[in-house]
Amino acid sequence: MNIDLKKPLSLTRTFLKTTTSGAALVAISFLAFQPQAFAAALEYAGPGFEQLTFPVPNPTTRLGVAYTNTSDSSPNGFTETWDGTNAAAPWSGVGTEIVGTGIRPTSENSGSGGYDFSGLTNNGGQLPSGTFFNLSDLDAGSGAESFTIRAFDLLGDVLTDGWLDDAVSATTGQGSVLSQTNMPQYVWDSGSGTYTFDGSNIPGNPAILVQLITNQQIATIEYTKTDFHAFAFMAPAEVPVPAAAWLFGSGLLGLAGIAKRKKA
């Protein structure tokens, strides 16, 4: 199944780390978005594989907004333009290009490729930490579906600490059952900085799309994949703070002023 990983969707939750409001509003965000704030890093080193954890609670829609649009593509490379519309900073207004090498990681191809994020000048030429990593349709429905992926910093050194956090969302376009049973598996090799994701543990073709989160800034990525699965990235949305939240925050500040006057 060919799933569009980049379809823009509205975001109902966001990261604590992207909250830039006052202390009262930070506390509100922390309580509302706790599942994402405490996602565990993926660092299972074997033996064998470990399944990704089904998120509880699980959002009813995919999180984030699309931020890349294809501007050029060929069998040996591709270029994408960052579209930060409705995305939170520093994902918004990044401009310029993401340069790809080899195959684009779409649903129905196999081979090796990579991403170079040096064109994302608004964030120092790196993919920001906290980016959604969308992994789709990784199951046993089309045979041995798996891929390996490594990430590198600005110096060209491979990241040897797990740079992906566990799942925060799982959705499906086929009406399949969303459960722990249908979550793909992975193993992490810190020596080579390699993630291997595998879907051979999932019978049939439930076509689950799982969203993980990057927890470090990334300059380049390289990957090798087999057929009929895909991955892409999405950015957290810029979510306006509800008026009620501002009023609540102002009320707290007012109470603090009253308390101070009483003390005086």
Image (cartoon, rainbow, N blue to C red):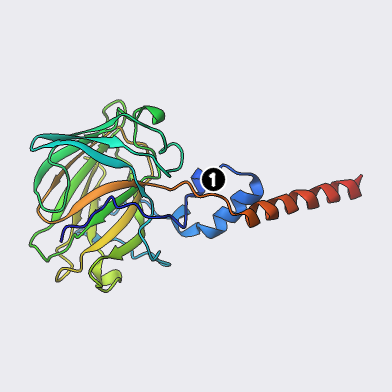
Q: Between residues 48 and 163, which one lies in front from this camera angle?
A: 163
Neighbour class for label 1 at 10 Å: few (<14), some, many (≥20)?
Answer: some
Which quarter of the figure is the C terminus placed in? top right
Residue at x 39%, y 54% (from the top left corner): 40
Whole-percent x, y for residue 11 in the image: 43, 55
Q: In front here: 25 or 202?
A: 25
Residue 209 at x, y percent in the picture:
27, 60
Q: Which residue is mark 1?
A: 19
SS type, badge 1:
loop
Judge whether residue 92 can be spotted in this image. Answer: yes
Looking at numbered disc 1 in the image, what kind of residue is underneath it?
Answer: Thr
Taking 241 as reference, is 221 left or right?
A: left
Residue drawn at (19%, 37%) of the image = 114
Residue 173 in percent (x, y) is at 25, 66
Horizontally, is 34 left or right of 252 in the view?
left
Q: Is residue 128 above or below residue 1?
A: above
Please state the horizontal and vertical placement of residue 192, each as a whole percent of the image: 21, 40
Q: How many marks?
A: 1
Is 23 left, or right, of 18 in this rendering? right
Quarter of the figure with residue 155: top left
Question: What residue lies at 22% left-to-right and 36% top-to-bottom?
Answer: 115
Q: Is residue 186 above or below residue 207?
A: above
Residue 46 visible from this viewpoint: no
Q: Quadrant of the N terminus?
A: bottom left
